[in-house]
Amino acid sequence: MSEAELPPWLKEQFARFEQLQQNLQAVLAQKQQVEAEQAEAGKALEELNKSANSDMIFKFAGNLLIKVQKDAIMKELAEKKELASTRSLVLAKQEARFRANLKEIQVKIDESIKGGRPRAMEGE
């Protein structure tokens, strides 16, 4: 069956499948970035825990390094890590939803190719 021979409802399913794949890839990229941010904040906190309260600590602010208090930067990093963790959970749920939708559409497409229009779509 060539693309020109595909019924409109099947073309629509292919388009939805392709869009979901793109959405899944975007979510996976975001999730990877968030997990890297979370790991970075965790590593910074780990290093700060090793330092003495009297050590000078600096952070980047654009192109500048600014001296900061240890407790203030630890609080900031802990919040950043927690936020990244929350975002990671949300992205994981989106990933699962996209994967489930992809699987559902794949089944419909497979049924269509094997034996005509799938039962779930006959009333449409």
Image (tube, rainbow, N blue to C red):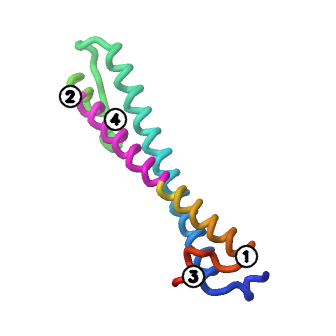
- The answer to which of marks 3 and 1 sits earlier in the sequence is 1
Amino acid at dot 1: Gly
Q: Report the disc number at residue 122.
A: 3
Say few, some or many: other residues with alpha carbon within 10 Å of mark 3 (under 14 / 14 to 19 / 20 or more).
Answer: few
Q: Which residue is mark 1?
A: 115
Q: Which residue is mark 2?
A: 72
- The answer to which of marks 2 and 1 sits earlier in the sequence is 2
In the image, 45: left or right of 18?
left
Which label lies toward us, 2 or 4? Answer: 4
Q: Residue at x 47, y 47 (%)?
A: 31
Asked whether 5 falls inside the magenta stretch, the response is no
Amino acid at dot 4: Lys
Tell me the SS state at disc 2: helix
Q: Magenta stretch?
A: 75-96
Tell me the SS state at disc 1: helix
Query: Looking at the image, do the residues carrying marks 3 and 2 touch, with CB atoms under 8 Å apart?
Result: no
Residue 39 percent across, percent down from the top left: 44, 32
Which label lies toward us, 4 or 3? Answer: 3
Q: Which residue is mark 4?
A: 81
- The answer to which of marks 4 and 3 sits earlier in the sequence is 4
Residue 15 percent across, percent down from the top left: 59, 75
Rounded to the nearest angstrom, the CA distance separating label 3 from label 2 is: 61 Å
Amino acid at dot 2: Ala
Height in image: 6 above or below 113? below
- The answer to which of marks 3 and 2 sits earlier in the sequence is 2
Asked whether 94 falls inside the magenta stretch, the response is yes
Rounded to the nearest angstrom, the CA distance separating label 3 from label 1 is: 13 Å
Rounded to the nearest angstrom, the CA distance separating label 4 from label 3 is: 49 Å
